[in-house]
Image (spheres, helix red, strand yellow):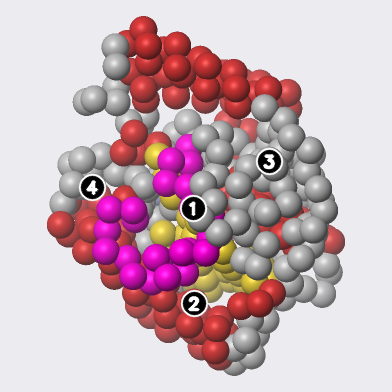
Amino acid sequence: MNRFTAVCLALLLAFGCTVTAFAADSGSYGAYSHVVIVGIDGAGRFIRQAHTPNFDRLFKDGAVDYTARTETKTDSGPNWGAMLTGASFLKTKMENGTVSSVQRTSDTKYPSVFNVVRQAMPDSALASYVNWNAINYGIIETDIGVEEVNITDDNALTDAICAYFDAGNTPTLFFVQLDSVDGAGHSYGSGSTEYFAAIETADGYLGRIFDALERNDMLDDTLLIVAADHGHKLRGGHGRFSMRETNTTIAVRGKTVISGGTMDKCTRTRDVAAIALYALGVERPDSMTSRVPANVFVDVRGERRAIYKDPFDAVTSALAWIVTLCTAWI
Ligand SMILES: [Zn+2]
């Protein structure tokens, strides 16, 4: 496509995403006792092209989007931050450096989903098991009783997660971040066999986590989300606007999820927060510009994004979209 067509398409898409609004209905709202989010750092849209037998078996009856849009900065802090707070990184200012160095506590203007669930369900069990410890330091509040575990080896981290479920723990909200795919992306790029091998290894960890849920009888009441925060350039690295960096995966599985659903084109990483809170029946706070996309839950046609709360983000996101389309063939 030529540049004029690309710009027109981007403007149409951006406009469509701002005005599309459908009424939500009840049914899936609060239908789940547990939400488990498994984050695969740096996997972007590339899970689709890798050999992932576990992902495939988990989500053959689920809703999957490989073109969910990242924040306007395709780094880990901005996107894990957006997924967990439901707000744009322009608001949360969760850069990699800040989440690594500034401890987050419950007095924040942009509460994480953990904080929101804690307020709604004071006695709930909440846990976050991550490889990149900045998530448990600078994104999830450290003073709200979340069991925060940091293990800088994905295999050992998976062992600890399985042990947690095998010990009989049944958390209301559980977050995982695997990091080795991102390491392979930085070293070799998203066109490399090493990168795809790392995705396939992460798929093995995902399978082990899923099996732990299954053998502990948690599946019936669990909404499982697998999400990637950003992708990688062909030769490695991220942070900018290319398709390889800005298109990413969100997959959802649960008893009220549309089998074979394809989320609408306005889906963003931050929408993980809305999907999780909706499943648990917890109201979203005003700080969020997160929405439940269409074609996730059987009874939800898709929600309006509250862009009036964050117009600067809406404008910069549309501009980023245009840059992505104008450089799609690079
Ligand atoms: Zn990342």
Query: Which of pointers 4 and 1 lies earlier in the amino acid sequence?
Result: 1
Q: Position of residue 319 (x, y in %)?
A: 47, 18
- Residue under numbered circle 2: 210
Q: Nearer the viewer, residue 238 or 322?
A: 322
Query: Which of pointers 2 and 3 lies earlier in the amino acid sequence?
Result: 2
Which one is in front in this view, the residue at disc 2 or the one at disc 4?
2
- Residue under numbered circle 1: 64
Amino acid type indicated by mark 4: Ser
Q: CA distance from mark 2 to mark 4?
A: 26 Å
Amino acid type indicated by mark 3: Gly
- Residue under numbered circle 4: 190
Q: CA distance from mark 3 to mark 1?
A: 15 Å
Disc 3 residue crowd, few under 14, some 14–19, many 20+, Cα 10 Å:
many
Q: CA distance from mark 3 to mark 4?
A: 32 Å
Query: Which of pointers 3 and 4 lies earlier in the amino acid sequence?
Result: 4
Q: Position of residue 59 (x, y in %)?
A: 48, 64
Query: Which of pointers 2 and 4 lies earlier in the amino acid sequence?
Result: 4
